[in-house]
Amino acid sequence: MINFIKDIVKAIIKEKFLKQQQGDTKSSTAMQIGGSGNIQISGNVILASPQHNSFDPIEIIESPTFDILQAPNNIYHAEGYDETLDFEKDYAAGHLSLSADFSQKIPPYAGYYVRPLLPKDWRYYIENKYIFSFDYISTDGFAEIIVEFKNINYQITDYKCKLVQNIWSTYNIDLGDQNVSEWELMKEICFVVKKNCLSAPYGKINIKNLCLKSTK
């Protein structure tokens, strides 16, 4: 009886071992992308070990999105200009609305920041020439918006985006030609409004679908 039980236990252990080997074989299939090291793709997750820098392999979402509607009420202004920019979240439509009123006061700046950013480590995306993309629709008064990318040291890379008026459009920002190391610990994305962003005292912009996209 004891020998019979031992045989059963051995059979169970052997079966688990074989399954584990099969699983390891499946997960070891690798794809080379753009000379950036060994990249293993599993669904929408990439395991990458960039060759330019020595750090442990990290899980990378292939096409990360950033839910602007889940961000807290992250509106900010230059001191004394609290009434110049307002916001509204339309959960049904899936977008954020920013309304600017510069009729009484013209602030040096006002904006809305999105944080936390997940993933925080953007080195893979910068090295592999990803673009940052968002959809928007703006009124006649909203001619431009400034998009800022900040790391934990508040080092800023900013882009002034000229906007198409009165129609849903997609804006793509090329993140190439950046210092890769500065994108390791990202903190926030900011949408900033200044005086020269408006062609009229009033303006409104709806923003949605923030994401990083591969150009390959």
Image: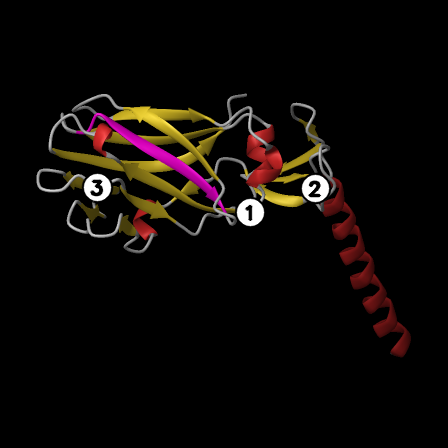
Please state if 197 lies on the left or on the right of 56 as rendered: left
Please state if 35 lies on the left or on the right of 8 as rendered: left
The image shows residue 89 at horizontal and vertical percentages of 22, 48
- Residue at label 1? 185
Residue drawn 33% across and 52% down? 70
Span shown in magenta: 142-151
Look at the numbered discs 1 and 2 and tell me whether their residues touch, using CB distance below 8 Å: no
The image shows residue 18 at horizontal and vertical percentages of 79, 51
Give the residue type at disc 2.
Ser
SS assignment for the magenta stretch, majority? strand
Q: Nearer the viewer, mark 1 or mark 3?
A: 3
Q: Nearer the viewer, mark 1 or mark 2?
A: 1
Residue drawn 23% across and 28% down? 196
Give the residue type at disc 1.
Leu
Q: Nearer the viewer, residue 39 or 197?
A: 197
The image shows residue 19 at horizontal and vertical percentages of 74, 51
Look at the numbered discs 1 and 3 and tell me whether their residues touch, using CB distance below 8 Å: no
Please state if 5 lies on the left or on the right of 36 as rendered: right
Q: Quadrant of the N terminus?
A: bottom right
Q: Counting other residues with Cα less than 10 Å from the Cα at mark 2, is it few (<14), some (14-19), or many (20 or more)?
A: few
Question: Residue 138 falls in which quadrant of the image?
Answer: top left
Q: Return the disc, 1 or 3, that comes first in the chain's sequence.
A: 3
The image shows residue 132 at horizontal and vertical percentages of 43, 31
Q: CA distance from mark 2 to mark 3?
A: 54 Å
The answer to whether residue 45 shows anywhere in this view is no
Question: In this rendering, is residue 4 above or below 141?
Answer: below
Look at the numbered discs 2 and 3 and tell me whether their residues touch, using CB distance below 8 Å: no
| Number of callouts | 3
Q: Nearer the viewer, mark 2 or mark 3?
A: 3
Disc number at residue 161? none
- Residue at label 2? 27
Disc number at residue 107? 3
